[in-house]
Amino acid sequence: MKRIIDSKKLFNLTQDTDLANLKIIYRNLIKEWHPDKFQDADKKTEAELKSTAIIEAYHFLVSIHPETHLANEEEYNNMTSNVGISKYTYKGQTLKITFQDGNEYEYFGVSKNIYNNFSTATAISRYARRHIFNSFTYRSVGKSEIAL
């Protein structure tokens, strides 16, 4: 959750910011903080760090944006309905799930109570379909090297 809040704060986003406006804000921030604009070594170093943070935040915000989810909705729903869970980890209210086809997703804001119920459920895939998959902000983090 902290990452979401920090990224939105960096871009000064509102709830209804669409992807097109997010891209415009991103481009303006990159122009403002591009390291080549600065001659002073300290300012250049600061700009390099800031531009790296801007790039990472932009890619993160795009990955959790509702428009991105809508574009991939059919594939996501098919996977969460038909592919089992091979492994999962939990850290700081972020649940990372690896599916049997190798796809990995992070779910943000998952409480310790929900995680405990999930991890002790007799059918974790069914529990996840009912209480996690469409209840929390999520993003795809790629595909693992070896599908288990």
Image (cartoon, grey):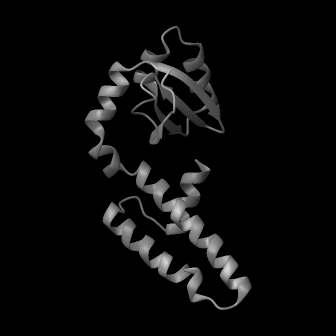
Along the horizontal axis of the image, is 143 left or right of 35? left
Measured as percent of width and height from the top left, residue 124 is found at 50, 16
Q: Residue at x 48, y 20 (%)?
A: 85
Q: Residue at x 49, y 54 (%)?
A: 60
Residue at the extreme front of the image, as rendered = 145
Residue at the extreme right of the image, as rendered = 42
**Which residue is at the front of the view, 26 or 145?**
145
Residue at the extreme bottom of the image, as rendered = 39
Measured as percent of width and height from the top left, residue 37 is found at 56, 88
In the image, residue 141 above or below residue 78: below
Q: Quadrant of residue 75?
A: top left
Q: Quadrant of residue 88?
A: top right
**Which residue is at the front of the view, 102 or 31?**
102
Q: Is residue 18 visible?
A: no
Measured as percent of width and height from the top left, residue 72 is found at 30, 41
Q: Residue at x 34, y 49 (%)?
A: 68
Q: Residue at x 56, y 56 (%)?
A: 5
Along the horizontal axis of the image, is 33 left or right of 44? left
